[in-house]
Image: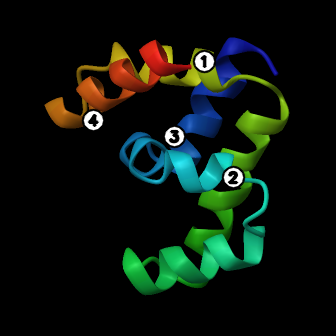
Amino acid sequence: MNQDELVRTIQSVGMTTFVKYFTAFLDLSISSEDLVDGLIKIAKYGNNSAKTKVNSARRIIKNSLVMEALEIISKSNNIEHWVVQKAAHLLEKE
């Protein structure tokens, strides 16, 4: 996955969604179906939207691009400040 594809994949998840549910996306013991159900119930996403978000997040993880994704998010000027801060914090932890 090149840089442009990574950015598009992050946008498919949503930067805020990726950071907010980062730990759940990273936990491979949680099935994708359970994550989809959780996003529908908790975040009120539609079924197709939730599937796209989960599949995109898991694609980033599968391709070992978590650090790069968090780096992109931590440098974004188009999202809420707390998301940028949390992405930066997660980068420090990883």
> Foreground: 63 or 10?
63
Considering every residue shown, the one lying at the far left of the view is 81
Q: Which residue is mark 2?
A: 27
**Badge 1 is on which residue?**
67
N-terminal of the pair, mark 1 or mark 3, is: 3
Neighbour tally class for label 4: few under 14, some 14-19, many 20 plus, Cα within 10 Å: some
- The quadrant in which residue 89 appears is top left
Q: Are marks 1 and 3 in contact (CB under 8 Å)?
A: no
Question: From the viewer's perspective, is the residue at label 4 or at label 2 nearer?
Answer: 2
| Front disc: 2 or 3 | 2
Eyeballing the image, is 31 above or below 82? below
At x 27%, y 35%, the residue is 83
Query: Disc 4 designates what residue?
Result: 83
Along the line of sight, the residue nearer the viewer: 48 or 66? 66
Q: Quadrant of residue 81?
A: top left
Quarter location, residue 24? bottom right
Seen at 66% across and 46% down, the residue is 26
Residues under numbered marks 1 and 2 in contact, where contact means CB atoms less than 8 Å apart: no
- Point out which mark residue 11 bears: 3
The amino acid type, in three-letter code, at marker 1 is Met
